[in-house]
Amino acid sequence: MEPKQITGDMVVAKAREYIGTPWHHAARCKGVGIDCIGLFVCVGQELGLQIIDVVNYSMGSQLNRMLDELDPYVIDVDLKDVRTGDLMVFSGKMMPNHCGIYSGEDTLIHAWRTVGKVVEMPLDEYWMNNLFGVFRIKESI
């Protein structure tokens, strides 16, 4: 069977269904609670990816471990090639600690602990200065 073709617009449309969902560490429930990597995991699963989710990670620098778990499903992308639906990973203190889904036109959808929920907001200078990497779902076209 051929792999499912997933578009960036499909990723963003699914991610937008989570806007307003409260932030909660290691949660995976639309409308109830979710964290930043959980948003990407749940969107991928809803689009048919068989992502093996790992929720026994601590807040902060453990996103690197979660990225290792996602490695079979994503490829690295150069920032100049970022497109709608890509996963953007941000760092603090030189370690990846947050991520969100690029929703186009310099905006990001992410479960942000600081505001306590999933939001869509501009990718401002703060975020761009802390960008660690960009990743794309392998099945994405």
Image (cartoon, grey):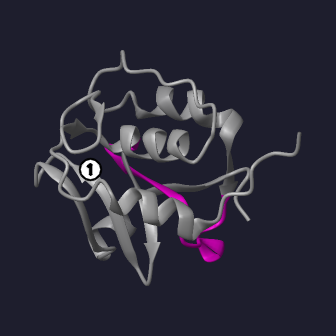
| 49, above or below 115, in the image | above
Q: Residue at x 28, y 35 (%)?
A: 29
Up/down of 89 relative to 55, above or below: below
Q: Is 59 colored magenta in this rendering?
A: no
Task: Pick whichever, 29 or 113, lies toward us.
Answer: 29
Q: Mark 1: few, some, or many residues within 10 Å (few <14, many ≥20)?
A: many
Residue 119 lies, in percent from the top left, at: 23, 62
In the rendered image, residue 41, in percent from the top left (x then y), is placed at 47, 39
Asked which quadrant contains residue 73, the reply is top right
Please state the extent of the stretch shown in magenta in the rendering.
Answer: 77-96
Above or below residue 34? Residue 56 is above
Q: Which residue is mark 1?
A: 111
Quadrant into which the N terminus falls: top right
Picture coordinates of residue 130, whole percent (x, y): 36, 59
11 sits to left or right of 121: right
* Residue 17 drawn above or below residue 52: below
Quarter occupied by the C terminus: bottom right
Q: Is residue 27 left or right of residue 53?
A: left
